Image (cartoon, coloured by chain):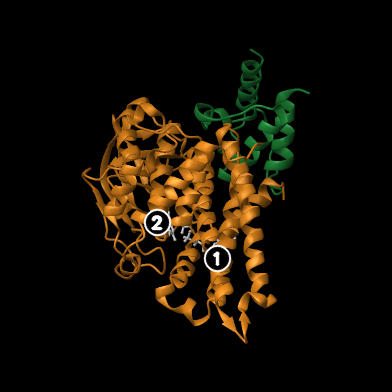
Chain colours: A green, B orange
Amino acid sequence: MDIELMIKDFVINELANESYEGEIDIHHSLIQKGIIDSMAIMVLIRYIEQEFSITISGTDLTPQNFENISTIAELVSLKLNTHKV
Amino acid sequence: MDFDINTDQQNLIKTIKSFAQKELNNNIIDDDKSSRFPMEKWKKCHKMGLFSLPFPEKYGGLNQSFLTTCLCIQALGFSCKDSGLVHSIVTQIICGIQLNLFGSDLLKDKYLPGICSGETICAQAITEADSGSDALAMKTKAIKNTENYILNGTKMFITNEPIADLTIVFARTNPEAKSFGAISVFILEKDTPGFEKCKAMEKMGLRTLQNGELVLTECEVKASSRIGTEGQGAIIFSESMEWERILLSAANLGKMEHVLDLSITYSKNRKQFDQSICKYQAISNKISKMKVQCELSKLMLYKAAELKDHQKRASMESSMIKYAVSEYLKESCANSLQIHGANGYMTETEIERYFRDSIASTIYSGTSEMHLNIIGKLLGL
Ligand SMILES: Cc1cc2nc3c(=O)[nH]c(=O)nc-3n(C[C@H](O)[C@H](O)[C@H](O)COP(=O)(O)OP(=O)(O)OC[C@H]3O[C@@H](n4cnc5c(N)ncnc54)[C@H](O)[C@@H]3O)c2cc1C
């Protein structure tokens, strides 16, 4: 399955509050929309690490990498490619 | 996962236990009464290399794994009767870990050697009067002018602050933005103009531990003193809390094991109605429960420490271990006091102090209620 789509599914179904009604586009800022906060980031990283068998730590842990679904998917792809090397 | 304790680890544990029993256990009742920080013992701890356990050798560290560090701190918690001093040591190591994980080479070269040796005392300032559990709702601001940041705000309850040379300060670099991405972390030296620390606060327990307020007024800090990138504060907070919660639990597990030993010995020696009180199930059940809690905690703790050694996430595990050990410790201390009867209530037997010390463990580094919230959230609830 497409990484972006998997992350989008997870964000919509697990992170966005039930009362959240807006559209979530892959380029929308999840931070500004309040979908990613200090608690949600833990849930999201745990999901990504388990689902894609990668580790995200140190310099990868920046707000820029978690800004929107597209940047998160890019980070995951990058990690998957480095693992393959 | 392999939790066999190897010979090197066993030797380290033995050395720390005998060091603590010989060098750290005098005058504790008096120090507790006067809330005095035992600086002479702190200095002995740096001679022992206690602060340097998990750090790279190039900074003067001992390059030990996090699991080994936890085993050493567990041994210290077991054998050092001054839980305030142990808490202070753990805070020092955690500040070093934070700097080592996220600091620039410049900051690490400058500060880690002093942190490892213990000559530089460290504190970590997050909490404010209006933001405790909701830590990231902090109001302290760090506003960038051309080169530097200007910090304004007040931090509360900060461990080691009254005696610290260095403080890791969390502040809001983007006051308009949501908390995530708006907070950054800085390392400040105590002599920085506009950096004012207040005297230590009186407390119920952990009385040798020095906790205080920090007031920042137009306090100017170089951009190079920022730990991590701008806006990375919330992530640094989540990551470093995992290490902190595991290491503090190691110390508290050690204390629980000590309280278990004391309860066994006392209940065997104390006779009422012509037999040892341990023969009454009302007493022995309390002790059996303590033993179960110690063993469960050990497994959870070592698993969480191993995860960090493998650069893995341990958000769920660190919350579970922090919640469990702090609640078990409080319960064990209360039960041990009951087993000791009036003797336990007297200052001299030291159980009442352990009980007072244990209360804070369900408050600092995230309250028990907050840990249950985190676990629930991670379960998708
Ligand atoms: C010994 C000690 C050392 C400390 N050291 C440091 C330090 O070095 N650096 C630092 O920055 N801070 C430090 N602190 C502060 C500590 O981190 C805070 O006390 C802690 O985060 C709780 O905040 P609070 O005390 O303001 O309680 P509050 O957040 O006001 O909570 C009060 C009560 O409400 C409950 N509560 C709050 N929100 C929720 C919720 N959403 N769901 C359910 N229950 C909730 C809490 O569990 C608690 O029972 C220390 C505290 C102590 C006691």
Residue B277: image quadrant is bottom right
Q: Which residue is mark 2?
A: B21
Quadrant housing the N terminus of chain B: top right
**Relative to residue B279, is residue B227 depicted above or below?**
above
Residue farthest to the top? A85
Pick the front one: B240 or A11? B240
Residue A23: image quadrant is top right
The answer for which chain carries disc 2 is: B
Whether residue B111 is visible here, answered yes or no, is yes
SS at mark 2?
helix
Label 2: how many Cα within 10 Å (few below 14, some 14–19, many 20+): some
Q: Which residue is mark 1?
A: B330
Q: Is residue B26 left or right of residue B320?
A: left
Task: Please state the horizontal and vertical placement of residue B251, each as a whole percent of the image.
Answer: 49, 53
Q: Amino acid at mark 2?
A: Gln
Q: Amino acid at mark 1?
A: Lys
Task: Please state the horizontal and vertical placement of residue B309, each as a whole percent of the image.
Answer: 55, 34
Whether residue B178 is visible here, answered yes or no, is no
Task: Please state the horizontal and vertical placement of residue B247, each as a whole percent of the image.
Answer: 50, 47
Q: How many marks overall?
A: 2
SS at mark 1?
helix
Distance CA(mark 2)–CA(mark 1): 23 Å
Residue farthest to the bottom? B273
